[in-house]
Image: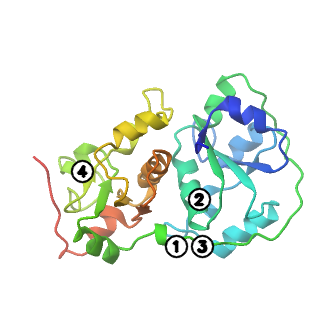
Amino acid sequence: MSIIIDELELRKKLDDKEIVILDVRTKYDDFETGEAAYKHSHVPGALYVDVNTYFKGTNTFLPDIDMLAKKLGDLGIRDDTSIVLYDQGNHRAATKAWVVFNYIGHEPVYILNGGFKAWAEAGNEVTTETPAFSPTIYHVKRNEDIVVSIDQVKASLETENAMLIDSRSYDRYSGKVEPKYKKAGHIPGAKNYHSKRVMSEKGLWKTTEELRCHFKDLQQDEEIMVSCGSGNSACINFVALIEAGFKEVKIYPGGFSEWIKDDHNEVEKTD
């Protein structure tokens, strides 16, 4: 089944007791926090989890796994519970949470296409009620192979069966502009697949076939490592590649920001 589900599919799942809906919205519009947005209105049956607290660490891409496991258990989530994630609609928080769930070996996990915005705009019911749940013990099954270090990236790029993707905009990848870092350009050998291009003009996920077409120049049997500046945009491409049928997908969360910390690491620019 597809990772991406629409609001109609989610509506059909609302009465399924084996599915947990997680609201992972962050600060946006009139809400200072995702929790404030959740308290204002949310999908019926959804539980709120602060993605910045539980799905990332202090200055690290990956969270404290033990703390995350305790939180999930406290919410009554087992390691075999089906999960649906939604954020405000830009898919950044939902894909970050999806990648972390993948890292701890949890499946199945789905993402609501268009997030809460799509749900509400379709005229679906919203609520302020927090559902009841019974705490349990969550057992982590780590899938550590999906995360690669800078040394692993360097070693993989020396082979002919690996590809590094830079998920940033072309202007940043090419080195034409760089608003955040001390150097501009990209990791030598990286190919640019801007993460926004896996979405339609309306900000919804492209279909599976459209994603396969988008990634048509990549080989299904090669190791594909996704990166960006520091991991967040890479999560969108990570999910898109899995949705398109790629199996050997990994993430390099250190990304360009880590690469340029060592002045010995070369940086490429594109004319």
Q: Position of residue 89 (x, y in %)?
A: 56, 37
Count of numbered labels shown in the rendering: 4
Could you tell me which secondary element the residue under label 1 belongs to? helix
Of circles 4 and 2, the one toward us is 4
For residue 173, which numbered disc appears in the image?
Answer: 4
Dot 1, crowdedness within 10 Å: few (<14), some or many (≥20)?
Answer: few
**Tag 2, which secondary structure?**
helix
Q: Nearer the viewer, residue 260 or 190?
A: 190
Specify the amino acid type for callout 1: Glu
Residue corresponding to mark 2: 52
- Image marks 1 and 3: residues in contact by CB distance under 8 Å: yes
Element class at badge 3: loop
Could you tell me the amino acid type at mark 3? Arg
Circle 4 packing at 10 Å, graded few (<14), some (14-19), many (20+), is many
Which residue occupies 26% across, 73% down?
A: 154
Above or below 36: residue 81: below
The CA span between labels 4 and 3 is 32 Å
Q: Residue at x 40, y 40 (%)?
A: 212
As rendered, which of 201 and 141 lies closer to the eye? 141
Horizontal side, residue 254 vs residue 3: left or right: left
Question: Which of the two discs, 1 and 2, labels the residue nearer the N terminus?
Answer: 2
Mark 4: amino acid: Tyr
Task: Please indicate, yes or no, whether residue 242 appears anywhere in the rendered image.
Answer: yes
Distance from disc 1 to disc 3, alpha carbons, whole Å, reads 6 Å
Inter-mark Cα distance, 2 to 3: 20 Å
The crowd level at tag 3 (other Cα within 10 Å; few <14, some 14-19, many 20+) is some
Q: Which residue is mark 3?
A: 142
- Residue 119 percent coordinates (x, y): 67, 30
**Number of the front mark, 4 or 3:** 3
